Image: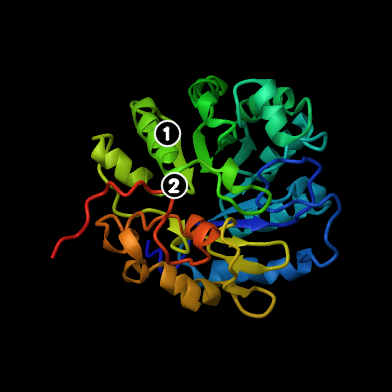
Amino acid sequence: MDLNRQPRVVTWEITRACQLHCQHCRAEAIVTRNPQELSYDQMMPVLDDMMEAFDVPPILVYTGGDPLERQDLDDLIRAAVVRGFPTAVAPSVTDRLTEEVIWRWQDLGVRAVSLSLDGPTAQVHDQFRGVPGTYDRTLEMADAIVRSGMMLQINTSVAQSTRSHLVMTGDLVRFLGANAWELFFVIPTGRAMVADAPTADDIEQVLSWLAHWAEGSRMRITTVGAPQWVRVRQELGAGRAPRVVVREARGFAFIDHLGQVFPSGYLPVAAGSVASEPFSRIYRDSPLFQQLRNPACFEGRCGTCDFAALCGGSRARAYAVTGNVLAEDPGCRGIAREVTA
């Protein structure tokens, strides 16, 4: 698959409404839906464009906010599934998420559901999510997803307040029977502040631990905001660097609730809008996406690192800290080998 021509994953923020109050919220979620959200009818041509333009339908993830805030969510799922998209849903764990909803999604053809779990105890998780009782309900819903036969992905935010709990959190993720564990290294955007985000040393230490912890694991383990995961694994002998890595603008794209297209949900620089041009054209031809796919454009150590083509550094963190999407990643400790003349 040529990731310069088509994405492997498209995450679509179908609403920004959510009833949780997460400390780190990328979206700075709101209580009520924005009346300017793309409607069902406005979204259908975007799905059709993806099916027509791409040889392989990308994995489509409906997220938010909380996608359950939309009354037409089931219709949106049907529209994706019937077109042939491998479809996933990333709900918030509120009273709207019930076992009945989970089984209905299974009947509709949803492949996977992702839940956030930011700590191994209610005290850690509920404080991070801002609503008491969220932890217990998350465990209940995780069990229901596993029993339904859909794939369960657990998302964990790696922040200053959660990283010391990662060992126990990882053990809990295994106990729950998750198929995938995705670790989101907090980037200072949205509600997240610089003090919330892990430092370069923190990230390196967590990735080194994760590489050893993951040995022999059947779970798919991925990172967001720490693309140097591929370097760390290779340097520690935990696996060869893969030929293809999905990263911002290369294999991945994010559509917000208004239809703007971004390289990442954590990189608030829009490449265009599906309200005015096809998604496939934005993905392939926008100057921003083309820049971020070209390692020769990266500055500082990211531009000289011999993992530039695979890792490329977190463009979202570079932008959040420096205001420059092409700057070197301040979250990388910079121990990778550099290309010599």
Q: Is residue 56 above or below residue 135?
A: below
Q: Is residue 139 visible?
A: no
Q: Residue furthest front?
A: 195
Q: Quadrant of the C terminus?
A: bottom left
Q: Position of residue 73 (x, y in %)?
A: 76, 51
Q: Amino acid at mark 1?
A: Val
Secondary structure under the numbered disc 2 in the rendered image? loop
| Mark carried by residue 185 | none
- Asked if labels 1 and 2 touch by Cβ distance under 8 angstroms, the answer is yes
Tell me the kind of residue under disc 2.
Answer: Ala
Q: Position of residue 31 (x, y in %)?
A: 84, 49
What residue is at 70 percent from the left and 52 percent from the top? Answer: 77
Q: Is residue 86 left or right of residue 90?
A: left
Q: Is residue 238 above or below residue 15?
A: above
Q: Total number of numbered labels?
A: 2
Where is mark 1, residue-wise? 206
Decide which of tag 2 and tag 1 comes sooner along the chain: 1
Residue toward you, 165 or 160: 160
Quadrant of the snapshot with the N terminus: bottom left
- Sort mark 1 into few (<14), some (14-19) or many (20+) by Cα contacts within 10 Å: some
| Residue 175 place in picture, x, y as percent | 53, 19
Give the SS element for disc 1: helix
Measured in 3D between alpha carbons, the distance from the residue under mark 2 to the one under mark 1, in whole angstroms, is 10 Å
> Viewed as shown, does residue 73 lie left or right of 189?
right
Residue under pointer 2: 226
**What is the crowding at mark 2: few (fewer than 14 residues within 10 Å), some, or many (at least 20)?**
many
Q: Residue at x 76, y 66 (%)?
A: 38
**Where is residue 97 drawn, in percent x and y?**
77, 36
**Farthest residue, direction left:** 341
Residue 128 visible in the snapshot: yes
Of 16 and 53, nearer the camera is 16
